[in-house]
Image (spheres, grey):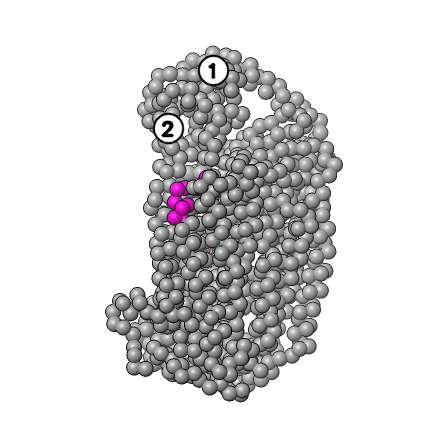
Amino acid sequence: MAHGPAPGFSRWLYTTNHKDIGSMYLWFSFAMFFIGGMFALVIRAELFQPGLQIVEPNFFNQMTTLHGLIMVFGAVMPAFVGLANWMIPMMIGAPDMALPRMNNWSFWILPFAFAMLISTLFMEGGAPNFGWTFYAPLSTTYAPASVTFFIFAIHIMGASSIMGAINIIATILNMRAPGMTMMKMPLFVWTWLITAYLLIAVMPVLAGVVTMMLMDIHFGTSFFDAAGGGDPVLFQHVFWFFGHPEVYIMILPAFGIVSAIIPTFARKPLFGYSSMVYATASIAFLSFIVWAHHMFTVGMPLFGEMIFMYATMLIAVPTGVKVFNWVTTMFRGSMTFETPMLFAIAFVILFTIGGFSGLMLAMAPADFQYHDTYFVVAHFHYVLVPGAIFSITAAVYYWLPKWTGHMYDELMGKVHFWIAFIGLNVTFFPMHFSGLAGMPRRIPDYNPLWADWNMISSVGAFLFGAAQVLFLYNVIKTIAVGRKATTAVWEGSHGLEWTVPSPAPYHTFTRPPDIADDDPHLVAGTP
Amino acid sequence: MLKLSSRWFAWTSSVVLAAACCGVAAGEWPLNMTKGVTDVSHNVYGLHMTILFWCIGIGVVVFGVMFYSMAMHRKSMGAKAANFHESTTLEIIWTAIPLLILIFMAVPATSTLKQLYDTEDADLDILVTGYQWKWKYEYLGEEVSFYSNLSDASREQIYGPKEKSTDYLRDVDNPLIIPVGKKVRFLVTAADVIHSWWVPQLAVKRDAIPGYINESWTFVEEPGVFRGQCAELCGKDHGFMPIVVKAVPQAEFDTWLGEQRQAALAVAEAAKQHLSFDELYSQGESVYNARCAACHQPNGAGVPGVFPAIAGSKVATGALEKHLATVVHGVPGTAMQAFADQLTPVQIAAVITYQRNAFGNNMGDSLQPIDVVNFTQNQ
Ligand code: HEM
Ligand SMILES: [Cu+2]
């Protein structure tokens, strides 16, 4: 038990410890968040006013593409995997992940994938410039030469995700402490279990579609080339069969995080634990049969259009159940508003607003007007930034004392929250208006009609960016000089992770904890 | 205590109301979707407003409860936490009510969708083809077709601090002309990558996909000018691919069609004349700047790895025949299009002459329009 980490850099290179790997994932994601954020700021700087001032259109397209890819695959997904690595074993009373050696690999191939992706910026012809959705034939027949590196990078990221997902499933199914039945697992564990199945189902589809591209580009096939008898729309069907579940991959673990935080700070059990589990599963199921709502304008038959519209509208039902459950958890609680709670509440409000615009987008005839405008940009940022980023931020503040043994600076956390909250809304709310007024997305320059809203959006974006610098500072400060944290940390703490000391020792639960039926440490709300 | 919560309520609802009212009176700060000018666009707008108000309504209730709890049930106010965590009745209610609202919304959505898809019995068919980065319009059965590019006025304002005009980037050299009071069907396709033909006021958006012909339609009752843009990322100049539709009375439309046929004859006539080197060069310069410079750059340097240079290029300093073939047929699989029917023989002769003598190429040779005509006819 005295066995601790190896000294120096080899500790990190060879580690199989879930906590080390979790930390590496989180730092990697944080770095990617800043790089992807910088690309977003290039976009917003160019869009500050009409006319081309800072970058050329081709470079602008490279920025949107890399921003989207890096945020999705580099920032959000690795952050969730990092949280899973850190927390799932501690939440289910396991000593480590089930497949620790593979865990090391699934992390370490990621930096290579992203180094390769970002290096395309310096290649002749430039980085990928066809959007994160990389529709063929723009991304095949008309792409810059660097597209091949992009394809390899995607393959590696996909492999990493699949390995991570297998590991998480194996851990959850096999390594739970005796007495922890499935319906006693914390929701974060549940949501990750479902997410991991989604990953295993759709990452191969992504790998397939980029492999087809590779064949079209280098081996003379024409999957997507109409001139050779191929079909550009096939690309979109395959892409979105991956892509739609992917957006749920970026939100389901967030549901789990928020379901842990709200009960803690409301000092009241989570309302409707089992309906939360069922709602998550229904959302995951529905996510497989709605992909074509991203393609309402490609010219599907009327019947197909109707089916996809109804299926999409249905997702609002389980999502609504979740929101109602969180609100009811707060109702008649005894609430305090520490930083994690602020981020969690903002999550519920802003994610709901994003859900509303999603419901509007589900109306196929109206989507003909919304599609590919800034209204869509507003919609997906309202789900992704508060949904994924705010929940991850909330999780970091919530568990940071457990990870480091130090308390973060509460005042600075609150300042971070408010600047981020205001910045986010100032950035993305006006995009609803510019989109409804007809501004297409992915354009480097625009008509003066939309100038005022764009100027406001750009100011908000820089404000949001500044808030994140504060976050970085606060995390470093916590590690360096934060005051000592207690074991339970929060007054309303529930769950096994709060039974181990802060900081969590390098090895935990080498002997499984015994979970009695009425164990008070189990997740709040478990029957 | 109650006062606080009702203040919250009043505050949120008045913000929402104010936003909604501004939407109606949009001026400098456009807030809402256009109502448009067709029956379909009115229905789409109605659907949009209905679902928006449902969302606002649900939002007021949900956020109302939430803000109430945050105001009243805080520890600092001495609130003691209750312990309830389940209620099957509640959970059934809030599954059932949204479901009913959705069914209620699905009815108008379905009927508008059917209307959008009803492309039968059109009076006029127009084939719309998307190119990087322009549109081609063909009036089927009328022997009239032309290309529609970003207007020069807009192009000149892109760089530099120049004041942007009202229609900046939303103006074209040749607008699409349609008759009022007629059902016009658009057949939409593309020649290279995927584009999307979108005119908000007509509520028409259809992807233009190589190898596919998509259908869509409109019926405009009053004359007017309606503007839109390409709505699918289609490469570098995706933001510079506007659409202008001009609806005119039937008589005016017929006159215009006649003029277009006349103009086609004039082009054929012009191809027979002999032009001096200077005429070719200067006309070539303006064609180059309007059509070629977007990729090959105004100074002919191209963009390394993306678009080849003209200055010192093998084609522009090699055999005339090869140069002509490249411009006429394009280079398949690249952004270099076949210009045979985008430019007149005079323009092709002029721009080739220009390319061979500008940017230090100094080839000293030139091409006559009739050479272009002969070349295309011999293929
Ligand atoms: C400071 C925060 C952010 C700002 C200011 C920002 C801004 C933008 C802008 C201006 C665009 C271009 C929209 C267009 O022209 O179509 C964009 C696209 C996008 N953003 Fe963000 N964004 C931010 C954060 C995020 C985050 C956290 C995510 C994901 C979790 C994200 C995901 C995307 C995606 C997927 C696209 C689409 C890229 C594409 O068009 O291919 N963004 N963002
Ligand atoms: Cu286009």
Q: Residue at x 58, y 42 (%)?
A: B207
Residue bearing the label numbered 1? B371
Regarding mark 1 in the picture, which secondary structure is present there? helix
Residue B213, horizontal then vertical, whole percent: 62, 38
Is ligand 2 closer than 8 angstroms to the Cβ of mark 2?
Answer: no
Which quadrant: the N terminus of chain A? bottom left
| Picture layout, residue B1 above or below residue B285 | below
Q: Nearer the viewer, residue A380 or A132?
A: A132
Q: Residue at x 35, y 23 (%)?
A: B317
Residue B18 seen in this snapshot: no
Which residue is situated farthest in the right direction here? B121
Residue A290, horizontal then vertical, whole percent: 60, 56
Q: Nearer the viewer, residue A38 or B190?
A: B190
User: What's the amino acid at mark 1?
Assistant: Asp
- The stretch of residues the image draws in magenta is A142-150
Q: Is residue A145 magenta?
A: yes
Residue A106 seen in this snapshot: yes
Residue B187, horizontal then vertical, whole percent: 64, 36
Residue bearing the label numbered 2? B310
Regarding mark 2 in the picture, which secondary structure is present there? loop
Q: CA distance from mark 2 to mark 1?
A: 21 Å
Q: Nearer the viewer, residue A344 or A511?
A: A511
Q: Is residue B53 left or right of residue A469?
A: right
| Picture layout, residue A137 above or below residue B73 | above
| Picture layout, residue A174 above or below residue A229 | below
| Picture layout, residue B171 above or below residue A202 | above
User: What's the amino acid at mark 2?
Assistant: Ile
2 and 1 marks in contact (CB < 8 Å): no
Q: Residues within 10 Å of mark 2 (few under 14, many from 20)?
A: many
Q: Residue at x 38, y 20 (%)?
A: B319
Q: Quadrant of residue A317?
A: bottom right
